[in-house]
Amino acid sequence: MLKEIKFNKIIKETIFCEDFIDFKVNNSIEFSKQGIAVLYGPNGTGKTSLAKILNSDNNGEYNAIIEGQNFTEKNLDIFHVIADQNTRNIIKGNTKDFLLGDNIRKEYELQEFINSSLEELFQKSLSGELKNNFKISKKTHYILETFPDYQLKAIIEDIVNTKSKGKKIDKEDFFKYTFELKENELEEYEQSKFDYLIEHIDQKNSALRNVLEMKLGNFNRNEQVKEIEENSFALKVLNKFSYKEDCVVCDHENINVVQLIGKKEENKALVIGSLNKETQKIFEGLDILEYSNDPFLIKDNIIKAVEDGEIQIVIELQEDMKKYIKVIQEKLTNLFANCVSKELYEKYNEYLMLINDKPLFSDEDILFIEKVVSENIGKDILLKRDDNKNLILLLDDKEFLNKDRDSLHLSNGEQNFISLAFEFLKAKNSSSKIVILDDPISSFDSIFKNKIAFSIVKLLEGKNQIVLTHNTDLVKLLEHQLKQCFNLYIFNNTPEEENGFLNINRDEQDILLHLNKLLDFFRNKVFYEIANKEHFLLSMIPFMRGYAQIINLPNEKNQLTQLMHGYNDIKIDLVKIFNNLFGTNCSFTGKFEITAKDISEFKIDNLSIFNTTTSYKLLNKTLKHTFMYLYLRLNVERTLVEIYNINTKRHDMLTSIIFQAFKGSSQENLYNRVFLTSKKTLLNDFNHFEGNMNIFQPAIDITDSSLNKEKNDIIAFLEDIREKHTVHLNKPVPV
C-alpha cells in the first residue's frame, strides 16, 4: 500500500487557480492504513476536472511523486478512474475485466496463456518453418494442392494466409488433431534431391513440374533429340559472341554468324516440333536447368528416354520425384506432430476441465454485487458461456456490457448503481496504483449509499483510493463501515484563499463524523479553544436550537427561536441556555443577553471565535459561516418587515416575508424575489439544524470568498431597498 502522493502541478485550462501551477503548499495526500483518502469539496471546486486530469485528459497536466518516482498524465497506468454518473451511461469493458474468484481467474490466466502460445506458434514458429524449410508461404503451393491429409492441409493454409495467420483455426480441433497425430518414420533419402525439389516444385512450367505432370501415354521416340541440346548450346555461344567474324571454337575466319544462328534455330525447332506437346514442354523448360546442379539429372534422363524410346526412364524419374514429395509431406506431418509442447497440452487440458464445469460466481465480491442487484433492482446477473465456451455476463439473460442503457430498460438510478458496482470490480482487477472515485453516491437513496460505502471499504480493500465527494453522508457512511478507515481533506480551489488539500486532523474528523463526540467537545474541550465567548455563543444559536428541539427542551428551543427572526426584540441569555444544554463539569459564568435586532447590527467583519492556534480549523470556519448565515437572514427579515410593514403573525418565515414584501408581477418585484430566494445563505436548511444536526455543512458547502461575495451582495441590496424607501417617504405629497 502507498503511504502518500505529492503533487507538484495540476493544470486544466483555467479551472485551477495559480496555486496549483507551482504546487508547493497543501500538495500532499496521505493515505490511511486502509489506503483511503477522502477529498471533500463543494460543487464547482474542480473535483471532476481533477479526476479527468488523473485519467490522462488531453487538456490537463499533472506532475506527481509516488514513492520517489515522478509521474505525469502520460503514465496511463497509474490511476484507475471511476468517473461520476454522467459518464457511466455504458458499462464498458470485457467480461474478464470484472470477474474475480480463483476458478475464474485461473480460467482467464489459462486462456491467455493458450491464446498467446498459439499466436506465437502460428504466426512465428510454424509460419517460419513452413517458409524457410519448406518454401511454403501461400495456400496455393503445389505441395498443399496434392496433400492427402485434408485437415492438416486446412491448418497449414490458414497459417500461411496473410490475412488470417491461424486465427480461423479451431483451438479444440487443433489440440485434438495434433495430440493424435503420429510421427512418421522417414525412409532414407538424399538431402540434395529433397532440397532441389522443395526449391523447384512450386515453379510452374519448370522441367521438374512438366516431367512430374507428363502423361506417359503420349511419349514418343526421337533419335535426333540430342540435337536440341547441341543446338541450344551452340546458339548460346553464337549469340554471346555474335560481334566476332571468326569462330571462337575452331578459328575459322569470316563465318556468317547470322546464317549459322538461323540454321541452328531452324534445326532445333524442327526436332522439337517432331515431339508431342508434353515432351516439347519439358525441353522448353530445360534451358533454365542447363547449368544448374540437378540431382535428379532431368535433362540427361529425358534426352536418353526420348532418344532410346525408353519410357521406363521417365516412369522411374517420376517415381523418384513422388518419393521426395511424400518425404516433404511426411516431414510436414512430423512438424505438426511435435509442434505443441507438453506444457501447452497440460494447460489446455486444465482449461478444458474448467470450461466444462458450469460457471459459477465464487468470489465474495461479485456474489455481493449479484445479490444486491437481484434484491434491489429485481434483475439477475448471470454467468454463462457462449458458443465458443467464453464466459459472458448477462443481466436477465441479456448482454449488458458496452450496451446503451436504453436498450437495457434501466432507470437512471439502476443504471448508475449497476455501472458503479461493476466499475468497483474492474478497479479491483486493475493493476493501477491508485483508484480515483469521483462523486460515487450522487443521486442514490440511503440503501444504495450504504452499499456503495461498503463496496469502497470492502470490495476495494487492498487498493489505494482517493474519493472525491461533496456529500458528507458518504464520509459518515465510510466511518460507520470501518472506523478511521480514511484520512479526510478539504479540497479548496479559490483565488486568494488557502488552497490545495487541507488536512482535517483526527480529533476534528471525529467530531465531524460522530455527534456524541461533537457534544462531548462542547461540554469540555471547547473552553480551551474559544477566543471570544460572545462570538462563540452567537455562532452556536442555530445548532443549539436544533439540539434543544431534539432533546425536548421546549423552553430553550422557543427562546432561541426568538433570536432567529430579525423582527424580534426579546432579550435572551445565551450563557444560561448553553449551560442548560451542555454544562456538566464545565460551563460559562455570568450572563450574555441579546436580541435578534442586536445581532443584525453586529460588526460582522471583526468576528473571532476560536484562538488562532486552534487545531479545530474546520469547526472554527463553520461557526463563522453559521453566524454569517444567521446575520444575513436576520438583516433581510428585519429590513423587509420594517419597510413593508409585514404582519409577522401571518408571515413569520423568511420565504413568506420575501413574497409578501415583493408581491405582484411587476418587473422590480419579480427581480427582488428572485434575488433573495436564489441566495444560498438565506434559504439554506442548515440555519435550523433539525434532522441530521450536521453543524459542519455550512462551512464545507461554500468557500470564504463565495460567502463574502454573497454577504456584500445582500447588504448592498438591503441598503438600496432602504435608500429607495427613504426617498419615497421624503417625496412631497401632491396637492
Image (spheres, rainbow, N blue to C red):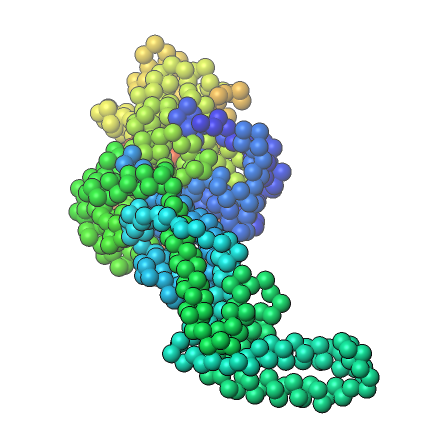
Q: Nearer the viewer, residue 570 or 152?
A: 152
Q: Nearer the viewer, residue 150 or 35?
A: 150
* The C terminus: image quadrant: bottom left
Q: Residue at x 42, y 34 (%)?
A: 465
Image coordinates of residue 115 in percent, x first then y, are 38, 47
Q: Residue at x 25, y 33 (%)?
A: 364
In this view of the protein, can residue 625 be seen by the observer? no
Image coordinates of residue 318 in percent, x first then y, are 43, 67
Quarter-of-image position of residue 321: bottom left
Q: Nearer the viewer, residue 370 or 152?
A: 152
* The N terminus: image quadrant: top left
Relative to 534, is 22 on the left or the right?
A: right
Image coordinates of residue 38 in percent, x first then y, are 42, 33
Image coordinates of residue 119 in percent, x first then y, are 42, 50
Relative to 94, is 193 on the left or the right?
A: right
Relative to 530, is 94 on the left or the right?
A: left
Task: In the rendered view, tell whether residue 186 sits above or below residue 561.
Answer: below
